[in-house]
Amino acid sequence: MTLVIEQPQLGFEVETKIFHEDLTELKLDGGFTVPESNAFGQTFRDYNADSERKESVEEFYRKNHIYQSIDFVRKMREGYGKLNRTEMSIWESCELLNEFVDESDPDLDEPQIEHLLQTAEAIRKDYPDEDWLHLTGLIHDLGKVLLHPSFGALPQWAVVGDTFPVGCAFDKSIVHHKYFEGNPDYYNPEYNTKDGIYSEGCGLNNVLMSWGHDDYMYMVAKENKTTLPSAGLFIIRYHSFYPLHRSGEYTHLMNEEDVENLKWLQIFNKYDLYSKSKVRVDVEKVKPYYLSLIEKYFPAKLKW
Ligand SMILES: O[C@H]1[C@H](O)[C@@H](O)[C@H](O)[C@@H](O)[C@H]1O
Ligand SMILES: [Fe+2]
Ligand SMILES: [Fe+2]
């Protein structure tokens, strides 16, 4: 099914595969099979399912929605944008993630390094020639190092979870939307309209997103002059923006380049989401391959 969303004001059409995912039509491009349920026997991303993680995930979003205001985002971008905290390689940062479990995630409670390798390996099977996409899979969540003491040990609500624009209305499709009633921006007439401080077609690059691992890792990759293609950087930066890539909201803020890049993000998302499982990847076995990709696309040491 192809969904064409009419956007006459933009002067171009946002045509994208499927925003509202229909699993019966979901064909991945190679051998990867989409599992019917997550590691807890529930459907993926079901925030209302009675699982052992339900309450803690909801509590996570309560805090996230209350504290992610435009002032908070500006402060974090300015502070962390300096990249003056440490220097390390991409692989070292993967290892740092070994100790963290993501509190926002209803589908996985394995250490994050497992998730990175599961995502990258699943993509590699179906897209053997797109080595940039394998590496994007490996690094897309590395911004979660913000949880580590050497990065200020940020609370989970400032690092993980789905992201959304600030400075315009919080869309109803955002998980646990009701908690925005505790966010000061919710009542500010400058920020609580559809466009808010933005204009139609302004491009996502000009939109401030809630602060977390996506935007931080994008900054790190870009400032350290990665040679990854623009689609790779886009995936890193917006992979948690489910209100856009799954629900099809906020498309009025995109420009033409965003529309192109969104196609790759939607491919990537299937692997990011549905590769989550309890089956572990043999780290030592795949490490040499990923080290070669890191060498191809990144300097040996990066500023963080
Ligand atoms: O719980 C998950 C997790 O934090 C992911 O890393 C993020 O990309 C998702 O958007 C979020 O919902
Ligand atoms: Fe993520
Ligand atoms: Fe991920």
Image: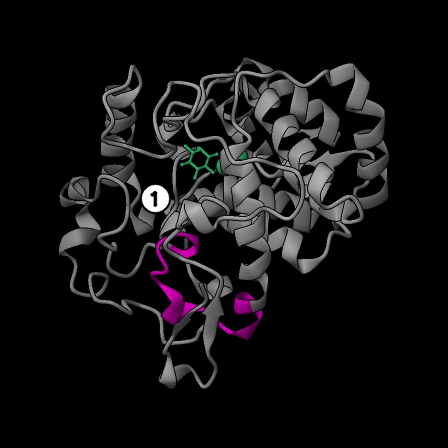
Front in this rendered view, residue 199 or 21: 21
Label 1 SS: helix
- Picture coordinates of residue 10 (x, y %)? 42, 82
Q: Which picture quadrant has residue 86?
A: top right
- Picture coordinates of residue 117 (x, y %)? 66, 27
Q: Would residue 17 appear left or right of 117 to someone viewing this image?
A: left
Q: What stretch is highlighted in magenta?
A: 244-259
Residue 256 drawn in magenta: yes
Residue at 13% x, 44% y is 181
Q: Name the residue under label 1.
A: 72
Query: Can residue 212 be spotted in the picture?
Result: yes
- Picture coordinates of residue 225 (x, y %)? 75, 51
Front in this rendered view, residue 60 or 266: 266
Residue count near mark 1 (Cα–Cα under 10 Å), binned few <14, some 14–19, many ≥20: some
Q: Which picture quadrant has residue 18?
A: bottom left
Quarter of the picture holding the C terminus = top right
Residue 289 drawn in magenta: no
Q: Would residue 215 appear left or right of 119 to someone viewing this image?
A: left
Please tell me how many numbered marks the rendered image carries.
1
